[in-house]
């Protein structure tokens, strides 16, 4: 048995219109089906579930909870996982980057940028804090799975900056893509990244 944290992008949603955030978008029927199959694939005991407060993440988390008999009123909501997310200092100011710089430029900054953009926290410091929180969570845990349901930007930033070499834009996580973090020997974090969703071939990452 292992101590595992899965950091998962939500399942499929409709396309977001340009210049909008799309917080109101719910899962598609295919997204619901995807999540059901994912929930069925989890064989370990589900110890905790936390979700971004955004609807599509809540739906993804709740489907997994129902399948595993996890109480819905125990599914947590965390603004570290979205609305605004762990790397955002000022959501309104940060949004101007998406409007003025464009999605690709912001995504590239999240993956490997070294400067601090308006509205953003220092990304390496923010990721470092998340890494320490993950290690503490797993160190104190019993064997089983903790699940965090979040957004592509959160998954991509963590996946890129918790390894020695950053991801490329072509590595951006698809629906239900994410990180599997396990507590290894002597308290190390063993991390693998699945771009196309769990069940696909993972890419091993090194925590550092």
Image: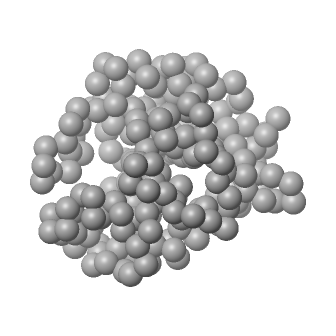
Q: Is residue 28 left or right of residue 188?
A: left
Residue 175 placement: quadrant? top left
* Residue at the (53%, 25%) spot, across then down: 38
The quadrant holding residue 201 is top right
Find residue 132 and report its image quarter. bottom right
> How was this image coloured?
one colour
> Which residue: 36% across, 25% down?
31
Residue 95 in the image: above or below residue 141: below
The quarter in which the N terminus is drawn is: top right
**Spot occupied by residue 160 in the image (x, y as percentages of width and height):** 51, 60
Q: Is residue 20 left or right of residue 163?
A: left
Residue 40, above or below 143: above
> If the image is split into quadrants, where does the C terminus sit?
bottom right
The residue shown at (33%, 56%) is 83
Q: Is residue 20 at least partly visible in the picture?
A: yes
Q: Between residues 61 and 40, which one lies in front from this camera angle?
A: 40
Percent coordinates x, y for residue 29 in the rendering? 31, 19
Q: Position of residue 6 (x, y in %)?
A: 59, 42
Question: Between residues 201 and 148, which one lies in front from this camera angle?
Answer: 201
Q: Is residue 133 visible?
A: no
The one nearer the camera, 61 or 151, is 151
| Residue placed most toward the observer, 87 or 52 | 87
Using residue 67 as the reference point, say whether residue 205 is left or right of it.
right
Where is residue 102 shown, x and y percent of the image? 20, 62
- How many numbered discs, if any? 0
- Seen at 12% across and 54% down, the residue is 19
């Amino acid at each position: 048995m292992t101590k595992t944290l899965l950091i998962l992008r939500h399942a499929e949603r409709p396309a977001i219109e340009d210049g909008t955030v799309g917080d109101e978008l719910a899962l598609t029927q295919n997204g619901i089906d995807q999540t059901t199959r994912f929930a069925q694939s989890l064989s370990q005991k589900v110890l905790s579930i936390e979700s971004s407060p955004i609807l599509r993440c809540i739906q993804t988390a709740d489907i997994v909870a129902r399948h595993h008999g996890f109480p819905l009123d125990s599914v947590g909501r965390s603004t570290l996982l979205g609305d605004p997310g762990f790397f955002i200092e000022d959501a309104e100011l940060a949004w101007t980057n998406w409007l003025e710089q464009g999605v690709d430029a912001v995504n590239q900054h999240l993956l490997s940028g070294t400067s601090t953009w308006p509205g953003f926290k220092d990304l390496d410091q923010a990721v470092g804090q998340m890494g320490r929180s993950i290690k503490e969570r797993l160190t104190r845990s019993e064997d089983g799975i903790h699940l965090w349901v979040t957004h592509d930007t959160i998954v991509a930033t963590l996946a890129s900056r918790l390894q020695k070499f950053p991801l490329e834009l072509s590595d951006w996580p698809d629906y239900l893509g994410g990180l599997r973090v396990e507590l290894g020997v002597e308290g190390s974090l063993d991390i693998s990244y699945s771009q196309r969703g769990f069940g696909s071939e993972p890419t091993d990452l090194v925590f550092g």
